[in-house]
Image (spheres, rainbow, N blue to C red):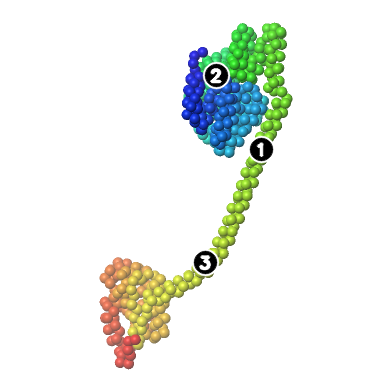
């Protein structure tokens, strides 16, 4: 056989490992190389793969490298799995899952769930297998790693095939094949070809089945994976058994048996014995059939004896129980944390409520002070001044808004009534602008004052204010105006009601 890409990679990694060892590197890089070597060798030399994984695990523990430990447990589990020791395989996969869940690595969690699913698949617990494989698929989809997704598609296809859900199995296998071909992953392509061949075989589409199995043989030879070569030869041999092509069947089954033994693929070896038994029964060579059925029985009892089944069941229950206990503990801790947070927040709210009731009283006092100040400012902003007996002057400065105009009216009417003044002068020299509402209000104020028998004039209208009043079309026909406050005062003092008392009064 030609030197394969896998063999070249193994050689490269072994050289890299020697270099790291010479340099005294005993950290993460060495762990990575050991685990990579272990993973590649699982398909052709599971014992050597186990040795590398064990070394990686020991080194990972020494430096507390969780990721390295999880990878080592996975590889050790694969090594046990290939040799048919499902109990130890499951034990290692569960350890890897616990570590990966602890460090929260989605790829690692997906790897563990996938391999646990495979144990249940090979021990005939198909529904349990689907449960873990679907979990694995979700983990891998979160990472977007095509190769990992393809692996799970393939395993789901195998599980569904065993449940005789062939259409679904075909669908998942074709999804896996599409990804494997896009990334040129020979190992995966060989697996899918073999699975597709099996589905065509159970449908009695033997020609199509042989076509896929032959493709699987070619690709697995290119990949240098004896484990899958054994599986493909076995599957092709099984089809020839169905077709009663005895010589071809024997040729392929014997090649499959040799490869299964070389790669320590115990399950493939078991399946070859079953097919050889069937073959020799078909050609009535019962002596040979008996020989192979004994080998099959011995190997099967070694793999699937009742004690192993019970131990696997116990291990499964322990895993589920530990998982539930861990979930319960997490739930308890979360509840405690939530209760603590609620208690702290309640205390904060109570304190905040108490503080707010101090604050509210202060706010009420401040608001009252503000209102008092606002009223005082308003009074100051609209002063009504008695400058002579019977004469009132209201000098306005600044912006005159509706509120201030209303206050002006109220103050002026009150003062007119209380002082019995007969003349009131509203001076707006200091008012820069007047809008329509305020102008109308001034007109109404003048009219209101007239109703009390008091003459009211407006002085100091600025040109821009006058333009605004004219532009707005406000009726000022009944409004007396004068240019300045001085003119307004001269006019007021000329009135009889004021001039008669001029000598006896002074401006206060």
Res 475 seen here: no
Q: CA distance from mark 1 to mark 2?
A: 37 Å
Which residue is found at the position 59% from the left and 30% from the top?
Answer: 73
Closer to the N terminus: mark 3 or mark 1? Answer: 1
Which residue lies under the disc numbered 3? Answer: 359
Instruction: Evaluate whether residue 418 shows in this view.
Output: yes
Furthest toward the bottom, the residue is 504
x then y, percent, for residue 467: 28, 68
Residue 398 shown left or right of residue 199 in the figure: left
**Residue 491 x %, y %:** 28, 83
Q: What is the crowding at mark 3: few (fewer than 14 residues within 10 Å), some, or many (at least 20)?
A: few
Name the residue carrying label 2: 225
Dividing the picture into quarters, in which one does residue 92 lie? Answer: top right
Query: On residue 94, which mark appears?
Result: none
In this view of the protein, which residue sits in the foreground, 420 or 312? 312
Q: 435 left or right of 64?
A: left
Apparent side of residue 76 relative to residue 303 in the rendered image (left or right): left
Nearest to the observer: residue 147 or residue 302: 302
Taking 350 as reference, is 453 above or below it? below
- Circle number at residue 322: 1
Q: Nearest the camera: 107 or 389? A: 107
Question: Is the C-beta separation of discs 1 and 2 under 8 Å?
Answer: no
x and y percent of residue 384 in the render?
37, 80
Which residue is located at x 59 percent, y 53 percent?
Answer: 341
In front: label 3 or label 1: 1
Q: Nearer the viewer, mark 2 or mark 3?
A: 2
Question: How many numbered markers are drawn?
Answer: 3
Q: Residues within 10 Å of mark 1 (few under 14, many from 20)?
A: few
């Amino acid at each position: 056989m030609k030197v394969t890409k896998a063999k070249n990679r193994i050689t490269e990694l072994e050289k890299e490992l020697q270099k790291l060892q010479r340099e005294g590197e005993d950290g993460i890089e060495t762990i990575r190389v050991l685990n990579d070597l272990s993973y590649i060798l699982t398909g052709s030399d599971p014992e050597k793969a186990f040795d590398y994984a064990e070394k990686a695990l020991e080194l990972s523990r020494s430096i507390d490298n969780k990721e390295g430990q999880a990878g080592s447990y996975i590889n050790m589990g694969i090594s046990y799995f290939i040799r048919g020791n499902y109990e130890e395989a499951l034990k290692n996969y569960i350890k890897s899952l616990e570590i990966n869940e602890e460090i929260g690595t989605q790829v690692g969690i997906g790897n563990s769930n996938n391999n646990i699913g495979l144990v249940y698949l090979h021990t005939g617990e198909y529904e349990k297998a689907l449960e873990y494989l679907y979990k694995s698929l979700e983990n891998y989809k979160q990472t977007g790693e095509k190769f990992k997704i393809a692996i799970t598609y393939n395993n789901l296809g195998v599980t569904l095939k065993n449940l005789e859900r062939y259409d679904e199995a075909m669908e998942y296998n074709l999804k896996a094949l599409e990804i494997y071909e896009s990334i040129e992953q020979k190992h995966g392509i060989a697996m899918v070809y073999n699975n597709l061949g099996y589905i065509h075989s159970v449908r009695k589409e033997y020609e199509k089945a042989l076509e896929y199995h032959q493709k699987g043989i070619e690709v697995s030879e290119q990949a240098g994976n004896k484990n899958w070569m054994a599986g493909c030869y076995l599957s092709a041999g099984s089809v020839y058994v169905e077709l009663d092509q005895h010589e071809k069947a024997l040729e392929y089954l014997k090649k499959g048996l040799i490869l299964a033994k070389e790669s320590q693929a115990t399950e493939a070896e078991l399946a070859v014995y079953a097919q050889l038994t069937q073959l020799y029964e078909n050609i009535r060579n019962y002596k040979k059939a008996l020989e192979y059925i004994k080998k099959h029985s011995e190997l099967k009892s070694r793999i699937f004896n009742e004690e192993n089944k019970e131990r696997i069941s116990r291990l499964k229950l322990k895993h589920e129980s530990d998982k539930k206990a861990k979930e319960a503990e997490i739930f308890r801790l979360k509840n405690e944390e939530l209760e603590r947070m609620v208690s702290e927040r309640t205390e904060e709210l109570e304190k905040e409520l108490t503080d707010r009731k101090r604050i509210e009283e202060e706010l009420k006092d401040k608001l009252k002070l503000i209102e008092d100040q606002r009223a005082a400012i308003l009074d100051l902003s609209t002063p009504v001044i008695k400058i002579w007996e019977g004469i009132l002057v209201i000098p306005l400065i600044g912006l005159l808004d509706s509120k201030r105009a209303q206050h002006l009216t109220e103050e002026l009417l009150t003062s007119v009534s209380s002082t019995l003044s007969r003349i009131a002068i509203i001076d707006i020299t200091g008012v820069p602008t007047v809008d329509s509402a305020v102008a109308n209000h001034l007109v109404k104020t003048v009219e209101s004052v007239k109703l009390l028998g008091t003459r009211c004039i407006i002085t100091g209208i600025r040109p821009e204010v006058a333009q605004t009043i004219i532009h707005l079309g406000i009726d000022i026909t009944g409004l007396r105006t004068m240019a300045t406050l001085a003119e307004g005062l001269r006019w007021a003092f000329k009135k009889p009601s004021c001039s008669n008392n001029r000598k006896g009064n002074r401006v206060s």
